[in-house]
Amino acid sequence: MPLELPDFPWDLLAPYAQTARAHPDGIVDLSVGSPVDPTPAIVRDALVAATDAHGYPQTAGTPALREAIVAWYERRRGVVRLTPANVLPSIGSKELIAWLPLMLGLGAGDVVVQPTVAYPTYAVGAVLAGARVVAADDPEEWPEGTRLVWLNSPGNPDGRVHGVELLRRAVARAREIGAVVANDECYAELNWAGDEPTPSILDPRVIGDSRRLTLSVYSLSKQSNLAGYRAGFVAGCSELIARLLEVRKHAGLIPPAPVQAAMVAALGDDAHVAEQRERYRARRERLAAALTGAGFRIDESAVGLYLWASRGEDCWRTVAALAEHGILAAPGAFYGDAGALHVRLALTATDERIDAATGRLAELANA
């Protein structure tokens, strides 16, 4: 029986992209959060130095990579007492998110909970496992029979952040019903309310002295411009990590050895992350000012690579209006019914294209 997957969201944007490309000065594509800035030299050099990779890499990650992940969580996220047994590299974070329900043994009759405004891959992972999706933000609304809960803080698309208290309640509720709780945290370093990363679900203030049933999912795509490397990892409960490792060994899901070496370099260098964050901060300030000047309201968006904006109308109508001015945005409907009045605009465009967008938004305001 074929899988009943939803339409791939970005295919639905094709006609609007065609309209935007017809603009005399070309398209400003703010629909996808794909980095445009160079991969840091320190990372590229580490990759090049590791290209004599004649043997099979380790599914669990090299000792150097596992130690680098552990050290990064302590230094940047305030997560203590992790060991190499608590961490595992992945081929980017999307792969891990899509296959996590299946790797945890979920199937028909099981429930996967996701946020009401959610990254589409959470639901795709449930479909791949044959599980059922429930959208709920309040931990008290998570039903019995839930086997996996996805949190997303900082959030994509809306940039919302869960504080320590809500994360603590989420972990407590998940343990009460026997569910794994996984927080997708890949935008944590891009915090516009301050220079410190946002709270991790593995923070001792959240989980106390036990990591049971708790996972943190992370990616280096955003903070280090490594989207093309497919460099991610998961950390948390050692029993869950061991289970994932066993499945991944059988399936051959292994980050290439040169990528593992590059990840070590990226995780050990905070300077390039701070530099990239400031690039995005400057772009965000210019784009946010132009959006509000054009009559948009920006909601949440305290962290991450996106502005979650609304004109109080159906998102597809807003997408069409922006496309007429050469700007391509993602409709909020891609992320669930709760996003129907919003569009998501990415900061992942060059300074020149961001400046072009600000001028076009001024034209839209006067249209």
Image (cartoon, helix red, strand yellow):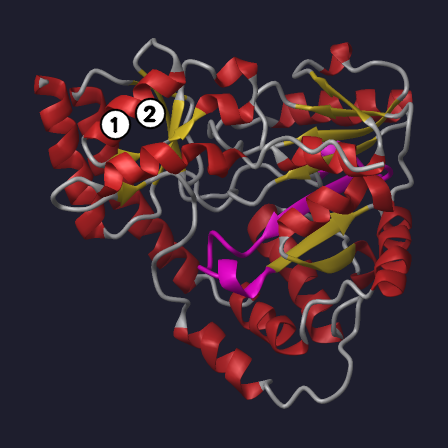
Q: Is residue 152 left or right of residue 128?
A: left
Please identify the quarter of the rendering in which residue 119 is found.
Answer: top right
Q: Position of residue 112 (x, y in %)?
A: 78, 26
Give the label on residue 322, or none: 1
Against 152, is 103 above or below?
A: below
User: Which residue: 10% across, 26% down?
Assistant: 363
User: Which residue: 84% across, 32% down?
Assistant: 130
Q: Is residue 207 left or right of residue 349?
A: right
Toward the viewer: 328 or 54?
A: 328
Amino acid type shown at disc 2: Val
Q: Position of residue 287 (x, y in %)?
A: 23, 35
Give the label on residue 319, or none: 2
Question: In the picture, which quadrant includes the N terminus?
Answer: top right
Q: Position of residue 105 (x, y in %)?
A: 91, 40
- Which element carries disc 1, helix, strand or loop? helix
Region in magenta: 204-230
Q: Per the image, is 211 magenta?
A: yes
Q: Residues within 10 Å of mark 2 (few under 14, many from 20)?
A: many
Q: Does the residue at mark 1 contact the one at mark 2 (Cβ under 8 Å)?
A: yes
Question: What is the spatial separation of the Cα atoms under label 1 and label 2, in whole angstroms?
Answer: 5 Å
Amino acid type shown at disc 1: Leu
Against 272, is 24 above or below?
A: above
User: Which residue: 8% across, 18% down?
Assistant: 366
Q: Is residue 201 visible?
A: yes
Toward the viewer: 275 or 329?
A: 329
Against 275, is 122 above or below?
A: above
The tally of labels here is 2
Give the label on residue 334, or none: none
Q: Is residue 192 left or right of residue 98?
A: left
Against 72, is 256 above or below?
A: below
Q: Residues within 10 Å of mark 1 (few under 14, many from 20)?
A: many
- Which element carries disc 2, helix, strand or loop? helix
